[in-house]
């Protein structure tokens, strides 16, 4: 069982994540009418080869929540920001691909999002602290199966 | 705009959160048939006065995701772990209250969950590192509006 101070560290970590992502989501919704999950999907597709990923790859890639990726892609497809395409011949099945409209939307939305990351996260820590946080959280992330 | 190394720190933080919570959720689902969100709701109610919270308080309290608290409570109510009660006379409206079955379930599930927190988070960091992570993430959490 974790000690009290170990649980304090865990709960601070969870609270920081929850509070920062709530702020980022609120700003994206207000200024761009985009949820943080939708932003995350557009950003992952933008950095993928051919701007496309299989649904399973996309679900694995998004950092915020694996659940609801299918519904997110449905919504993004209706908005014209993503298209689903059947990939023949390589057995990969269906991919989601970023459209040009999706790339444009991401470009605009990223200004809101990155300004939020600076305001709600980066500016609260000095350079050494950011580096420490990067090292510790990378170790935690890389240790997971 | 954030620098490359600032974005690295931010993305490591997100990845650590996503990967740890996925592991914790997978273990809770396998061993206890409980989602992490459901666990979080039971835990928040257990530590609240009268083991009950207004729905809005509950949505604010849960650390993992604000969305879907209503649906979570619906599901927990069908499982007999939570009841909704109308609170008369103080204008608070409807509260969700932990049942005795819910408290029992939380007791069992917390063994799985806390063992997971140790394995996937606490054990990867030494005492000083945990303390550092607690301080930095608390500062980030407390700075949010």
Image: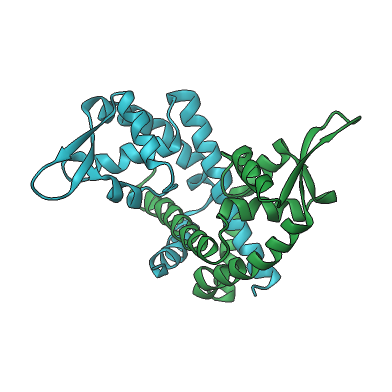
Chain colours: A cyan, B green
Question: Which quadrant of the figure has residue B75?
Answer: top right
What quarter of the picture does the C terminus of chain B occupy? top right
Q: Which residue is nearer to you in this view: A61 or B5? A: A61
Question: Which quadrant of the figure has residue A72?
Answer: top left
Q: Is residue B118 left or right of residue A133?
A: right
- Res. B126 in view: yes
Residue A13 sits above or below residue B56 on the image: below
How many badges with numbers are in the image? 0
Residue B58, horizontal then vertical, whole percent: 70, 42
Residue A65, horizontal then vertical, whole percent: 44, 47
Tell me the residue at 21%/27% (across/down).
A100
- Res. A114 in view: no
Tell me the residue at 56%/44% (across/down).
B65
Residue A30 sits above or below residue A23 on the image: above
Q: Is residue A60 left or right of residue A139?
A: left
Q: Residue placed farthest to the left in the image?
A: A89
Q: Which residue is nearer to you in this view: B9 or B81? A: B81
Q: Is residue B33 left or right of residue A100?
A: right
Residue B44, horizontal then vertical, whole percent: 71, 52
What quarter of the picture does the N terminus of chain B occupy? top left
Q: Residue placed farthest to the right in the image?
A: B89
Residue A27 sits above or below residue A3 on the image: above
Q: Which residue is nearer to you in this view: A36 or B3? A: A36
Q: Which residue is nearer to you in this view: B71 or B58? A: B71
Tell me the residue at 30%/30% (across/down).
A107
Residue B100, horizontal then vertical, whole percent: 79, 57
Residue B134 sits above or below residue A97 on the image: below
């Amino acid at each position: 069982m974790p000690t009290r101070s170990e649980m304090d560290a865990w709960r601070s970590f969870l609270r920081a994540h929850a509070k920062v992502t709530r702020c980022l989501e609120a700003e994206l919704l207000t200024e761009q009418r985009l949820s943080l999950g939708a932003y995350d999907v557009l950003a992952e597709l933008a950095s993928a080869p051919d701007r496309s990923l299989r649904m399973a790859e996309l679900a694995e890639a998004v950092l915020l929540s694996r659940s609801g990726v299918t519904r997110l892609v449905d919504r993004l497809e209706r908005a014209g920001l993503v298209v689903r395409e059947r990939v023949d011949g390589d057995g990969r099945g269906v991919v989601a691909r970023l459209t040009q409209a999706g790339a444009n939307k991401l470009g605009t939305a990223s200004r809101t999002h990155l300004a939020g990351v600076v305001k709600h996260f980066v500016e609260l820590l000095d350079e050494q602290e950011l580096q420490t946080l990067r090292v510790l959280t990378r170790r935690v992330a890389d240790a997971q199966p």
